Image (cartoon, grey):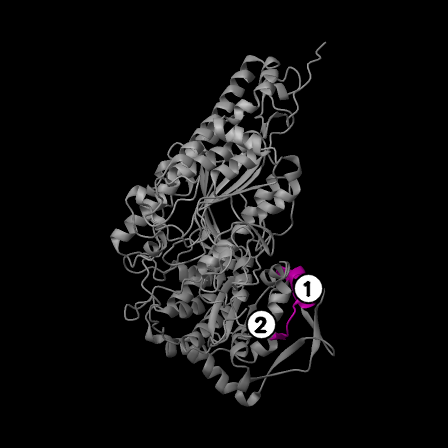
Amino acid sequence: MQAIGAAKPPLGVIFDADLGNAIDAVLALAVLYGMDGKNECRVVATTVSKHCLASAAMAEVVARFYAGTVSADFGAVGRGLPVGMSIAGRSTESTPLLDAVLGRKNPEGKPVYNHGILQLNDTADVHAVLRNAYTSQYDQNCVTVLAGPATNLAGVLGLPGAKELIKQKTRALVWAPDRLGTDPAAAQKLLAEWPAPLYIVTPELGASLPFPAAALETNFAWSETHPIADAYRAARPMPYDAPTAAVAAVLAAVKLEPYFTLSAPGLATLSPRHTLVWKAGAGQHHLLQIDPAQKTALLETMTTLASAKPVPRAPRRRRPPVVDAAKPDPATP
Amino acid sequence: MITRKALPRRTLLRGLGAAIALPAMDAMAPALASSQLPGKKPVRMAFVYVPNGIVDHKLWNVAEGQLGELPRLLKPLDGFQGDMLHLGNLTHNGGRALLDGAGDHGRCCGGYLSGIQPRKTAVDIKAGITCDQIVANKVGSQTRFASLEVGLEDGRQAGDCDSGYSCAYTNNLAWRSETQPMPPILNPRALFERLFGTGQILSPEARARQGKFRRSIIDFVTDDTRKLQSNLGPTDRRKLDEYLSSIRAIEKQLEKAENDTAQIDPGIEKPYGIPADFAEHFKLMTDMITVAFQADMTRVVTFLVTREGTSRSYREIGISDGHHPLTHHLFNPASIEKVAQINTYHVKQFAGWLEKLKAAKEGDSNVLDNSMIVYGAGLSDGNRHNHEDLPTLMFGKAGGAFKTGRRIVYRKETPISNMYLTMMDRMGVNVEHFGESTGRLDGLNLS
């Protein structure tokens, strides 16, 4: 039931990625928070398919950063959304980009970027987070973005009533598939059972939109410490312009027009080599396409949004911090 | 050659208008198995629900791992650390608004044991079958009562009690079906008659005899008692004496409550038979539940301590403000202190019950060991009205299955339905999914 007369909020976005395996998904999350800060969407859940605390911690670092934790001017303390993390045992290792961000220390030897994820129970039950996020959205006012393997979303599809719920709540899933060999069964399940339209962002599209690394020295320079810039520099030897399939997925989820178009419907399946095979025809799947005339504007939008400054949010109501008496807040420097 | 026949587990002491079930006794065990009960000991489940959340996590939570010193709100439970599981981060998503606006009290209680969100309505109510009733449906045929529903505060069953949510949601814990709540028994006499009456309608003469002479129910089963005692060993005779004495003590408390002219609250007429004193009421009801567990009259109990969202005052401990208004304390230290006192007062009464359960021997263990008693609330912080990290304690070892004495903090958003699923497993009811479940709770079992 939906409350009568209540104003519909901006589009809710559920973001799931194997965060840390490539810079693309980190940039995508930054762009997402950039749009959230402009009230063009709301981030309603972030989940990671890497079974790795550092991956979940990275998601929280980015969330807190865009809520203003790096600057006292903004006075924010983070958004309080728990990060769901897969415990399926896939992609468990940390990565250089995660290590660079989470390991960066200030001159006093304390972490530069705050997060509250030190142990497993600082993360959330990923299937509950995803299902709960859907339950709280207005019908057709939600989009899911997936970057990487489909472990988490395939798991949610196994919950009773989840398919009906997703169909009711979400407009589409925008998927930048990558590293599908990590969990091919999940990819097959998602392709076969996802109950809403599925837009696929191919690696080729991502490669055609290289993120300009030079922007790190300009657009991101407003903050001496920037987790996205640090992650970018650590992900691969510089200089490089990263492909942006996941970023395109996030942008297409919120701003399909004017940047993108959709192919005629078809059906994607998983090949034995763990790549997607496309067949036009009947189906709920579409390939995301870019309007060549929009490419420059699109890259500029990506850069601007990813490097957006935090947006101060008025506190909803006075709340004292909830403290576990026996556990110091790990985020406190 | 040994020929002694075991006493049937469901033996009743019968008399005029009375039927008293027996506790587990050695004589019920096969010959020579003096300290062993016949077969597996029954495992019981009970849910004790307190309203309006708790006041402050700092006063409730302890460090993860082995339980040591307890925080202020749980101080009355000192000594029960070894029987306790202090569970963290359990969540009831259906208690949240999910686009339905205000009404956290209605939602949190109405869907607490079903793990769903009740329909926002004051008329055509719809919630979900609760886990206790699923278990009752499965194991209820093995006991005299499939389940018992008990409470301490009277409340309407119809009308709007919270922002459009029916009073059926705030005033009931157990639901037989999506549309059938099971109102709790509030009157101790009614519970007593249910447990120890035969279910027969007494003749006016018999009723008059009972009333006129105020005879104990024990007197009506004297013949059966005498016959039974002659066949019992000394240990069982002592156990039977203690058991019947505990029933007699309950009767005396009932009589006292019925004769008491004190008022619960100025301006509120005390219902006949309900003690004016909250603690006495709590004790009476839980004493009877203890007997019901001891005698295996039921294995499933829900206990709605007071209505969700209640504005009951606690003059017994010097608090004349309503509970619910106090929980919205605006960070006024005096109000916070009063809520803490109410929360502690509830815990204190509950601890008294645990003592009884622990004292009720059952072979070489006790009733508490063979139970899963959940003490919890449908709101976390009564001021914030949040539905994550619900205050949840579980007592008892579930018949030796659970490793108690620990605080376990689960991952955030872990559905409380996962706990119900785990408890249903222990009751022998295997269900794949329940409510919002995403799996079972891990880490509870010994192995």
Tell me if mark 2 has few (under 14), some (14-19) or many (20+) residues whose alpha carbon lies within 10 angstroms of its own: many
Q: Is residue B211 above or below residue A305?
A: above
Give the residue pinned by disc 2.
Answer: A170
Q: Is residue A215 above or below residue B34?
A: below
Let me know if residue A188 is in the magenta part. Answer: yes
- Residue at 54 percent of width and 58 percent of height: A128
What type is the residue that disc 1 sits on? Gln
Answer left or right for A89 relative to B78.
right
What type is the residue that disc 2 sits on? Thr
| Residue found farthest to the bottom | A293
Q: Is residue B14 above or below residue A229?
A: above
Q: Earlier in the sequence, mark 1 or mark 2?
A: 2
| Residue found farthest to the front | B205
Q: Nearer the viewer, residue A273 or B336?
A: B336
- Residue at 42 percent of width and 69 percent of height: A228
What is the number of the mark on residue B47? none
